[in-house]
Every structure is written in C-alpha cells, then in structure tokens.
Image (spheres, rainbow, N blue to C red):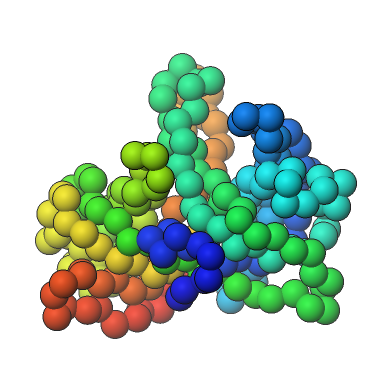
Amino acid sequence: MHMDGLPENNSVAISGKIVEECVFSHEVYGEGFYTFKIASERLSDQADILPVTVSERLIDKSQLKIDTYVDVLGQLRSYNNYNSKKNRLVLTIFAREICLTSEEERKNQNQIFLNGFICKEPIYRKTPFGREISDVLIAVNRAYNKSDYIPCIVWGRNARYMANLKVGENIKVWGRVQSRTYQKKIGEKIEERIAYEVSVSKIEIPHTDEKKAEETTEE
C-alpha cells in the first residue's frame, strides 16, 4: 500500500464514523491540534474505536461532529503520557489528509503499512484454543531523530516466524489498526482500559527472499 505524499515507512488509510466529540489536545508553535475517536467496522460487524489527531489547518473543528463519516490518511504515532504516575505509551492516528463523506459514500477501509525495526524480543504464546500469537514492538523512524513505537500482534504461522526474529532486525508489516479492551487491577479497584495495536496480516524481511504470504487475521 502506497499513499502519495505520505512517508513510505508509516502509512495509514482509514475510514469511520465519529463517535467521540472533537476536543482540543495541544498546540505546537501556534498550531492547534484536536483529537476525536472514530468507529472503524470489522468484517465481523464489530468496530474498532480509534483515536485520531488532526491539525486545525486541515479542517474546521466544527465540521467534526458525532455521527459524521470521515476518510483519513496519515500515520500511526506514539507518544509518552507524562500525566500519569507511570510512563505510558499512547497511540494515535495522526491525520495528514482528512475529508468528510456521506453514509452512502463511506468506505470500509482500515489499512496500515509499517517499515521499522524490532525493538523488543517478540513474545510467543498460545491461546486456550491453540491459536498461535506473537506480540512485537516495532520502532518506526520519524523526522528529527524521533521514532514511533508501535505494538503489533501476529497470528498463526506468521507468529511462529516472528518469534524467531532478533531485536534490531528490519521488518515490514501490513495489517489493520485495532482496539482491544482489557482490565487492570489497581489496588482494590479494577479499571477497564483500551489498548491500540496493529493486527498484522503480512510480514516481509527486506533484503532476503523470505516473504510471508497474507493470512486472515482474527476478527
């Protein structure tokens, strides 16, 4: 997947319906940025609820109303949340292009391509039903010596292959951005939280002949 005008190592194309109000996020050199959430439908009729960050220079905030459909081209970015007691990685889809669409015109797309480096040893496991999974954190370079750290989940035979890769290895992945709810116990309380990750459908190791075929991901 290649999207003209976007960095080739981190590209997201996603469509969805706005389900959470657009609010002010932060300002950089006088440029305001806003965040909102969209529901991106899966084939299983479930939906991923995903955060989007957009500059005030791209679109008027007043147009980003709940139940509006949008198409977004951009990147999946990470930053550290210093507001919490513990340093926590936060992900958002950073819009480079955004347009409004009608319900009749809406697309059902959620695609991402990353070209980065494995920065933690992959964790391989099996579900109680025997499904093979590998979790891997990929660092994707950005301008000005910055990097985005993207958690990915890999399934089946690709999970076995991923488990044998080493830290520092260059890897390309294709997939979709997804949300996942989980519970975390804090003291006597249990909090429900949302994690964001890339569900990988295809992997490729550059400069080798080993290329993994596309595989259906879990919906």
Along the viewing direction, whichever of 58 and 113 lies nearer the viewer: 58
Q: Which residue is drawn at 51% across and 62% down?
A: 6
Along the viewing direction, whichever of 190 and 121 lies nearer the viewer: 121
Residue 13 placement: quadrant: bottom right
Residue 104 placement: quadrant: bottom right
The N terminus appears in which quarter of the rendering?
bottom left
Residue 201 placement: quadrant: bottom left
Relative to residue 45, is residue 24 drawn left or right? right
**Total numbered badges shown on the rendered structure:** 0
Q: Whole-percent x and y of residue 184?
A: 46, 33
Q: Whole-percent x and y of residue 82?
A: 48, 22
Q: Residue at x 56, y 51 (%)?
A: 93
Q: Whole-percent x and y of residue 88?
A: 43, 30
Q: Whole-percent x and y of residue 121?
A: 18, 48
Relative to residue 131, is residue 166 drawn left or right? left
Relative to 155, is 26 above or below? Answer: above
Q: Residue at x 87, y 46 (%)?
A: 62
Relative to residue 159, is residue 208 drawn left or right? left
Q: Report if residue 188 is visible in the image.
A: yes
Along the viewing direction, whichever of 24 and 178 lies nearer the viewer: 24
Relative to residue 203, is residue 93 drawn left or right? right
Relative to 84, is 109 above or below? Answer: below
Q: Residue farthest to the right?
A: 62
Q: Which residue is drawn at 23% across and 52% down?
A: 118
Q: Report if residue 123 is visible in the image.
A: no
Relative to 102, is 80 above or below? Answer: above
